[in-house]
Image (tube, grey):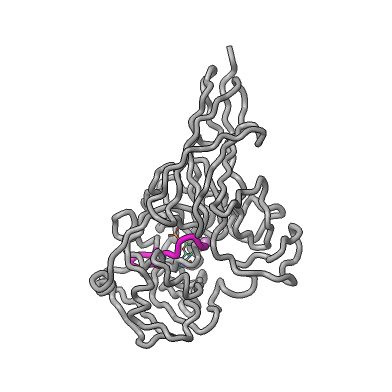
Amino acid sequence: MQHRRDEREGLGGKDGLSLLGDVPLVAETPEELLDDETTPIARFFVRNNGLLPDPVTDADSWTFTVDGEVERSLSLSLAELKSRFTQKTFRMVLECGGNGRSFFEPKAEGNPWTNGGVGCAEWTGVSLGDVLREAGLKESALFTGHFGADPDKHGSHEHQAMSRGVPIAKALEEHTLLVWAMNGETLPFIHGGPLRLVVPGWPGSLSQKWLKRIWIRDREHDGPGMTGLSYRLPVRPLAPGADAGNVENRILESMPVRSIVTAPADDAGYPAGTRTIDVRGAAWAGDDAVARVDVTLDGGVTWTEATMTPPRNRYDWTRWQASLTLPGGGFYEIVARATDSRGRAQPFRAANWNPNGYGCNTMHRVAVTVGPEV
Ligand SMILES: Nc1nc2c(c(=O)[nH]1)N[C@H]1C(S)=C(S)[C@@H](COP(=O)(O)O)O[C@H]1N2
Ligand SMILES: [Mo]
């Protein structure tokens, strides 16, 4: 099959993203463009595993089905979803499971994300759990399988580009949403409109775009992205570069704690005589909360605890800020380290190496220079 159009058209309206790949379309957000409390759509990263699906003209007649281990299979239009279930809006982080991949040494397979495979948007929709309860889960219901309308990267509709799933408990969480609006606007096509899933705190690949079907299964789902070493991490630390095929692996679920510095930008220059630098950023911790964020400009000799703005709701990111006092002019590296509510902090270097490069949460650093002293 041929590409029906240029995949890069999908980036129309985007502002300042870095393209990591055009077929499939993948683009990340430079950290300094993640400085808003709510990530604007124009700056929200894009990750496709296949090609764009056919354009949709009538969103409200988009249908989506639930079948498998349920009492009643459901086929619902978007209009029915909107009118029959309780509408909810939460601000929640969506992060690619491979965010940070480029920091692994030796290099891991896949898109070389730095820190920008993440964004935090207001998602409006209904709880998937409310819809599953209407379908009636059988005792045998153990896992979900997610299906979208996009063809695979060769343009074929025979196979899903990606089809992952979660244990039923995660599917039943109130914050796991079927979403049709983002930041108060109709969900953009590039982000999965008319209808997508948002499974917060876990790898972005679970948040199926252009959602057509949820298959309730009596076993772990086995679609593309669920088998082999996909989204798996070694249970015990592996020597970097070693063969992961022979050791015990587990599926990556909750994403690890992470923070980014969103101001100043890397390589910022300050006039001579500057003695205070205001630093801002964001932090998040998968299913857990962020307990604290600390910032250093001397390689970790001394740390300053940042002030945090409480998140709006579970799975929102935590914005933080700190004022750092400089001993004088010169070159400084600002490094932020978040700690989650279970006491786990970020590593100095990419830890827990795995061949596909998932879950890298090494600390983010930005360099700044305070101009020559007179
Ligand atoms: N149908 C479909 N849904 C998908 C994907 C895809 O390729 N096809 N990619 C997933 C991955 S890997 C990520 S990280 C998120 C990215 O969502 P975004 O493009 O809205 O930022 O979508 C997920 N949902
Ligand atoms: Mo992803």
Residue lying at 50% horizontally and 72% vertically, measured from the top left: 166
Quarter-wise, where is residue 72 in the image? bottom left
Q: Is residue 318 above or below residue 172?
A: above
Q: Residue furthest bottom?
A: 71
Q: Is residue 102 above or below residue 277?
A: below
x and y, in percent, of residue 259 in the image: 53, 46
x and y, in percent, of residue 298 in the image: 64, 31
Tell me, yes or no, whether the highlighted magenta stretch contains residue 195: yes
Q: Specify the segment rendered in magenta.
A: 192-203
Residue lying at 50% horizontally and 44% vertically, measured from the top left: 31
Left or right: residue 10 versus residue 342 is left
Is any part of residue 46 visible from this angle? Answer: yes
Q: Is residue 321 above or below residue 28?
A: above
Q: Nearer the viewer, residue 162 or 247?
A: 247
x and y, in percent, of residue 301 in the image: 67, 33
Tell me, yes or no, whether the highlighted magenta stretch contains residue 330: no
Residue lying at 41% horizontally and 49% vertically, measured from the top left: 311
Main SS of residues in magenta: loop
Quarter-wise, where is residue 10 in the image? bottom left
x and y, in percent, of residue 335 in the image: 59, 38
